[in-house]
Amino acid sequence: MEQANKVPEESAHPGSLMAKRGVWVSLAFVVMWSSGGIFVELGLDEARPFNFLALRLLLSTVIMWLICFRLRPAFPTQWVEWRDILITGFFLQVGYQIFFFLALAYEVFPGLLAIILGAHPILTAVFAKEETNKNQWLGLLLGIQGLVLVVGDSIFIGTISVVGIGSALLSLASITIGTIWQKRISLSLPANMALQYTVSSILLSFWHSCLNRMR
């Protein structure tokens, strides 16, 4: 009788279980996000930036549409929603990733690129007019100071090209603008990402085609 009434530990503390899962999910996200530059740099040894990015977007598009077919989320019905998805996809997927790949292609080290992109959360909070405290402002100023010292020294001694650093800064600007604009979208995540990847694939193909014609 006592054994039958015994409640499993996980069921008795659902909040604790969810907290543990949240920690592991957060750690997995940090590992994948922070290691992205390393794996992209390895991939660029075997492929051109546009080809590598096109393959990545294609695979992401297919995966997200398979998820949508399984979950059947709601899709946008108004032009304003489509406009926001188009703009967000352009900055967050196309602009950010193109300049990210180009920065690595022009020999910006993954660690330095991560430092530059590390300013993204604070810049987003500032330009989105979110509440920021003194510690965040202090962190931003210290981060910018360190960034200027590292980047300036690297350019001065010739270890990094101006084009590479410019691409890294444009990548930072793109992800910041895209993140701020994405706050306007209330669509479910699977539908939002599927449409963003689809639009981004089309825009990237168009961009690549225009560049080839200009050569």
Image: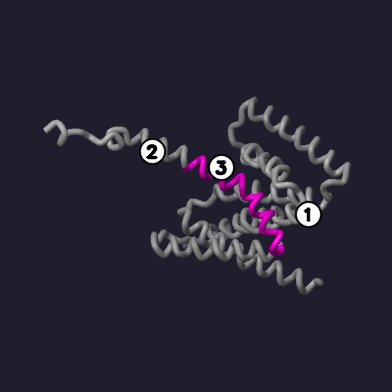
Residue 37 belongs to the span the image colors magenta: yes
- Give SS at disc 2: helix
Where does the image place residue 161, in percent across and percent down from the top left? 83, 50
Query: Dot 3: within a 10 Å radius of its alpha carbon, few (fewer than 14), some, or many (20 or more) residues?
Result: few
Earlier sequence position, callout 1 versus callout 2? 2
Q: Nearer the viewer, residue 125 or 47?
A: 47
Quadrant where the C terminus sits is bottom right
Q: CA distance from mark 3 to mark 1?
A: 25 Å
Q: Which residue is mark 2?
A: 18
Q: How is the image coloured?
A: one colour
Q: Is residue 193 above or below residue 122?
A: below
Magenta stretch: give its range.
25-48
Q: CA distance from mark 2 to mark 3?
A: 18 Å
Look at label 3 and name its amino acid: Val
Q: Which residue position holds label 1?
A: 106
Which residue in the rendered view is the most extreme toward the bottom?
A: 213
Q: Which secondary structure class fits the magenta region best?
A: helix
Q: Residue at x 73, y 43 (%)?
A: 112
Amino acid type, residue under disc 1 in the picture = Tyr
Disc 2 or 3, which lies upstream in sequence?
2
Give the secondary structure at mark 1.
loop
Query: What residue lies at 76% left-to-right and 72% top-to-bottom?
Result: 212
Residue 30 badge: 3
Question: How would you rate the neighbour count of disc 2 (Cα within 10 Å): few for under 14, some for 14-19, many for 20 or more?
Answer: few
Cα–Cα span, label 1 and label 2: 43 Å
Q: Secondary structure at mark 3?
A: helix
Residue 159 visible at all? yes
- Specify the amino acid type for callout 2: Met
Q: Is residue 180 visible?
A: no
